[in-house]
């Protein structure tokens, strides 16, 4: 593989992953930016994402944050998966809200990394806080190996 700057490598990893990410695409999640240890994704809350209390179902918020986490921890062309995740729901998201999830790396050493994701609405109001721990597995992000680890 040709030499890439860290930024170019992160963007190439994000593009390769997003092309294979049917789950994120199916939710209408958009890849807005990627960098070394970081990612920014967007999603608009659709009518089919609303739960019985009239707000966005927490599972969709978790999926948005989890996707941002995945793009951030896979930005070095070293395949990584989630080892554990948690989320705190801070405020409701409503039908039509434009949500932005920004993931940033807190630490990365050996085979594990720690990442925080903030989800905010179009007014910049905090909706949820997510923390994920990644675990590096075998393989490349850009050219994944066939089979399972």
Image (tube, rainbow, N blue to C red):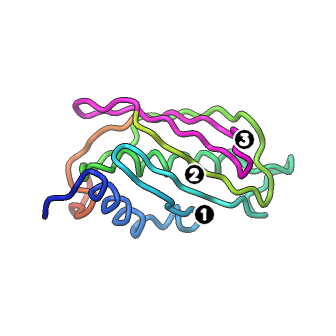
Q: Which dot marks residue 52?
A: none
Q: In this view, does 13 lie above or below 38?
A: below
* Quarter where residue 47 is shown: bottom right
Q: Of the residues tagged 1 and 3, which is closer to the observer?
A: 3
Secondary element at image label 2: helix
Closer to us: 38 or 74: 38
Gap between marks 1 and 2 measured at Cα: 9 Å
Q: Name the residue under label 2.
A: 64
Q: Name the residue under label 1.
A: 27
Residue at coordinates 51% horizontally, 60% vertically from top-left?
A: 32
Predominant secondary structure in magenta? strand
Q: Do tag 1 and tag 2 residues touch (Cβ < 8 Å)?
A: yes
Numbered range of the magenta stretch = 106-132
User: In x, y percent, where is residue 24?
Assistant: 52, 61
Q: Does the magenta stretch include residue 112?
A: yes
Crowding at mark 2 (Cα within 10 Å: few <14, some 14-19, many 20+): many
On-image quarter of the N terminus: bottom left
Secondary element at image label 3: loop
The answer to whether residue 20 is left or right of residue 76 is: right
Q: Which dot marks residue 125?
A: 3
Gap between marks 3 and 2 measured at Cα: 16 Å
Q: Is residue 75 magenta?
A: no
Q: Is residue 1 among what the camera can see?
A: no
Residue at coordinates 53% horizontally, 67% vertically from top-left?
A: 25
Between discs 1 and 2, the one toward the N terminus: 1
Closer to us: 134 or 73: 73
């Amino acid at each position: 593989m040709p030499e890439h700057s860290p930024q170019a490598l992160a963007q190439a990893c994000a593009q390769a992953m997003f092309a294979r990410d049917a789950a994120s695409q199916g939710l209408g999640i958009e890849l807005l930016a990627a960098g070394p240890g970081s990612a920014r994704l967007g999603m608009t809350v659709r009518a089919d994402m609303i739960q019985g209390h009239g707000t966005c179902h927490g599972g969709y918020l978790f999926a948005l944050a989890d996707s941002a986490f995945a793009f951030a921890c896979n930005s070095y062309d070293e395949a990584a998966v989630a080892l554990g995740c948690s989320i705190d729901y801070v405020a409701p998201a409503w039908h039509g809200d434009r949500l932005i999830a920004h993931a940033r790396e807190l630490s990365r050493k050996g085979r594990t990394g720690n990442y925080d994701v903030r989800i905010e609405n179009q007014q910049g109001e905090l909706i949820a806080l997510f923390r994920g721990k990644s675990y590096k597995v075998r393989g490349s992000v850009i050219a994944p190996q066939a089979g399972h680890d």
